[in-house]
Amino acid sequence: MPPSAADDDLRGFGMMLEARAGELIEQSGKFSELHVKQVLAMADAEGLAATQLSDEATAKQARTILGADRVVTLKLATDAKGMTLTGAIIDAKKTTPFTAKLPITWPEALTQGSEAVAKAVLATEKATLPKKPSAQPESKSPEALRALAQCYAIVIRQPLGIDNPAVLNGDELDGASALCEKALVNDPSLRFANAVLALSRAIIGDAAGATKALNGLADTDDMVEPYTLARFWMVTRFQSNEDGLASLKVVLQKHPGELIVRSYLADTQSVLNDHAGSQASWAEYLTVNPSSAFAHGRLSKELARQNKHDEAIAAAKKGLELAPTSRAARLELGSRYIDANKLDDAIATLTELKDAKGEALARLGWAHWLKGNVDAAAPLFQKALETATAPGEWRTRGRVHYNLALVEAKRGKLDAAKASLMASMQTGYKVRSVDASLSKVAKEVERAEFQKAGADAGSGTRLSLVPKESSLVPFDPAGEPDLLRKKDTAPQGFVIYKF
């Protein structure tokens, strides 16, 4: 679990400590591990505060939702004498605490703290650390580690945008990159900083910067997840989709316990419309992490894309059985019922979502719409619009505005339909084919937009409506992968990888 601490600096230190401990644990070959990015994504989907995940009650809830055999919580505190690390290993039956006194200096505290965590976890399987442990991050420079901690804490929170484009804060990522560069100035041998820098530049679209950082690393760094993900990103964007997938498969041959790599492999296959391949990858994931509600939900989606609706519903039901309180698992099951046109089941399932917002309300409203319940659908669409407020939810807002246009057209209120359709287009969202009921107003809206575009061009004030996004493959404004678009030209110095 992400560490608990009194301030951001200490939490950043704790994130590095966990990264190094995770590498040491993986080296034993005894465990499969969920990466902190997966844990943070779960917390976001479930409405759990990331800063509270190391509280015992929240950690127990997270363990169930993640389908983990055990989770490790960490709390860090400092005083004049040094640091105190208080941790616990939580499984289905018991909580096993451990503690460690650490020096106040970061280089020594990082090494000793990460090894204390690794020892405690390895002891649960009667395993031990090697005599001379070696893992990243590691540095003798306090300044380098402090800069890396700040950089890593920012980059690790960023979504990668595999199956959906991710809206990014460019200024924040630029600041993070500058911090990683500062870390490397203070310690050029800090490979972890190079890997995080490469990932930061890759997802923000600075291909030259990502290439420069990647060229300072080697295949032997593939246990450092930021390197694996940055290389995969760049190879897919500039080399080929097939080589991007191959890069992940090669890593899994050497490190089969890296669950985040399994997840990105399956999600990428799905985006590339290889739903049978994605189904196989999620099934393989479940052989390693059989209690993962998330993986059962993803498997259900791939089955549905192949019109295997009964199997898809069974997989989604299994996910919800494993994690009955999971919002994401319930949303997956409701979605599978919609896919199968079992609308009463979809409505019953999605209505049980507590504190539903945004996308969940949009799907519930859509189930009512498909059933012909216009008066039930309309307020749900409106509430979805009011609660889909995050920058990354702009497509949800655009789609809901479009759905409200359908509602108004159905009611015969074409002026209101035109206003909703205009609002949808102003988000940057655009459907590939407008519903027949909106064809007349769509022409009026497009004519108005064309005239406005001409005026904007004349004044030199034309701006893109679509926010800055990151995605592995190009997506159109409706959120569909554009797989026919030609690959961008690789930046100078980009090394062709062979797998």
Image: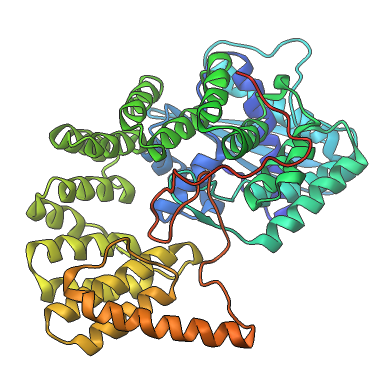
319, 267: nearer the viewer: 267
**Residue 77 shows in this picture:** no
Question: Residue 338, image x and y in percent?
Answer: 17, 51
User: Which picture quadrant has residue 318?
Assistant: top left
> Which quadrant holds the C terminus?
top right
User: Which picture quadrant has residue 354?
Assistant: bottom left
Question: Residue 279, image x and y in percent?
Answer: 32, 28
Question: Which residue is located at x 52 percent, y 21 percent?
Answer: 249
Question: Which residue is located at x 73 percent, y 42 percent?
Answer: 491
User: Which picture quadrant has residue 237?
Assistant: top right
Q: In screen coordinates, is 460 left or right of 106?
A: left
Q: In screen coordinates, is 375 left or right of 470?
A: left
Question: What colouring style does the render use?
Answer: rainbow
Q: How many marks?
A: 0
Q: In screen coordinates, is 47 left or right of 404?
A: right
239, 402: nearer the viewer: 239
Q: Is 425 located above or below residue 281 in the figure? A: below
Q: Is 165 located above or below residue 129 in the figure? A: below
> Which quadrant holds the N terminus?
top right
**Residue 70 shows in this picture:** yes
Question: Residue 339, image x and y in percent?
Answer: 18, 47
Question: Residue 123, image x and y in percent?
Answer: 58, 16
20, 274: nearer the viewer: 274
